[in-house]
Amino acid sequence: MSDPTSAEADAADDGSEDAGSEPDAPEIDLPSEAFDAVLDALADREPGEPVRFEGFSVARGADEDDEDAPVEDAPGEYVLADGDRPVGLSERELHEALSERAAAVTDWYTFERVVGEFGPRRAFLRWIEDADGDTVATRYAALAEGIERAWGELKITATVTDRGERRYDVRHADDAGVPVDDLDAYDDPLNARDLVTFDEQGRYRPLKTAPSLAGGWVFPDLGPRDLYEAVETIYPATVANWHREREGELDVTHWRETMERQSGIYGVVKTWDRGEGYEHVNWVAEACCDDSQCLKRREWQYDDETDLDVDGGDGAFPCREPCSVVVSAARKWTRLESEQPRTYEFDLTPSEKEQVEDIIDAVADGRTDEIREADTKEGANRYRARFLRAKLFDDEGNLGGVPTESAEE
């Protein structure tokens, strides 16, 4: 039995908008499988218990000798309620009536039978076409033109066939408008596993939600279930957590709780917890959880009572706990921060000091590849950096000829 949030309940909206403002939905042919699904749904219900579509409903009629006939003035094998007076219909007449209302029927069939039970998949597919806001006619008119949605670095385009079937084109947002023939086309959503492994430069991507997804590919013709599979393969658990958040059920595990359960080589991170002092966690979040580094929106804080001072980002999908990349980086920083500070003296001109700052900023922001070799105005320009190294490093690679005092590894 469908729950109250099923497509039947969603489609029960009687479309109270002014009829003149409704766009013309495309002509839809009622597929036999959709009609058969309606008959199956009715067979599972008591006489008079309707299957609801947008603007009308259908129920099984009562037996002729049933004194408790639910619709006494509409005798027939089936009863169509569409307006003030119900109408009794035979199976053939029901098929004709549903064919005239094929958009609403195929919409019900898509979400109730093809997509299935209410959950992350169904919520995500309905969100793509604003199925909980617009009427069927409005959505089908938009689907005929193509509805575009962004999900991380993905561009998803939803369309509808003349049989009311949803089809989806999934590609990198940078490839919007590129003909399918100019991209590597795939039809199996599991092919996405290989597409997300390396970035454009062939470097391994340890964080699947990093904004470094390579382009040049397309899934041009996915069905609803395959679309969900492809998106979850490219961005694991993002739809599930997005759905939990929408339902008010997102379970967030904060920094302290996450670190307290670390063991083995990662147990050292627990020694970095300074009680009330959590400035180091702000540094970690600023380094790892900015929009430029991860497409998730950080929802975890220091603990239940203490928020971090660093913004969590603007991503569409939430981050519910420090990820393995954050934990691994924190382990390294824990060891580095355990070193005792030393004082080193170097002679730098004001411009050289600013150049060191520019180099650090460029590396931290991943902009080094964007700085042209001929642009020596940039402090992080490769030739300027090489000049600074030639001037300030000794033969052993020590800055200013000052050796680094040994520290524990």
Image (tube, helix red, strand yellow):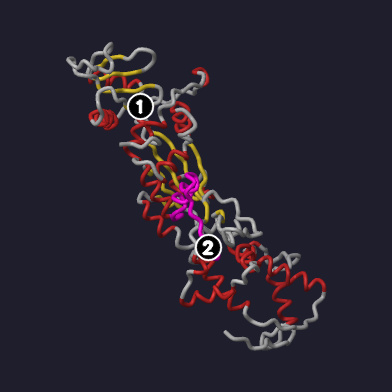
- Closer to the chain start, of discs 1 and 2, is 1
- Using the image as rendered, state which of residue 182 and residue 25 is in the foreground: 25
Q: Quadrant of residue 363?
A: bottom right
Q: Of 192 and 116, which appears nearest the observer?
A: 116
Q: Which residue is mark 1?
A: 52
Q: Is residue 258 left or right of residue 373?
A: left
Q: Is residue 181 above or below residue 85?
A: below
Residue 4, percent from left and from top: 38, 35
Nearer-the-camera pick, 302 or 397:
302
Element marked by disc 1:
strand
Image quadrant containing the C terminus: bottom right
Q: Is residue 177 left or right of residue 276?
A: left
Q: CA distance from mark 1 to mark 2?
A: 44 Å
Residue lying furthest left: 65
The residue sitting at 45% across, 33% down in the picture is 143
Crowding at dot 2, Cα within 10 Å, few <14 / some 14-19 / many 20+, comes out as: many
Residue 196, position as x, y percentages in the image: 45, 59
Residue at the spot of label 2? 322
The segment highlighted magenta reads 234-256
Figure check: 408 above or below 285 = below
Mark 1, other Cα within 10 Å: few <14 / some 14–19 / many ≥20: many
Name the image quarter holding the N terminus. Answer: top left
From the top left corner, tell me how far across and down residue 68 is, in percent.
Answer: 24, 17
Q: Quadrant of residue 334?
A: bottom right
Check if residue 332 falls in the magenta segment: no
Q: Position of residue 145 (x, y in %)?
A: 48, 33
Task: Tell me the kind of residue under disc 2.
Answer: Pro
Vertical placement of 225 versus 400: above or below?
above
Amino acid type for the residue under numbered disc 1: Arg
Residue contact between numbered discs 1 and 2, judged by CB atoms under 8 Å = no
The residue shown at (67%, 65%) is 362
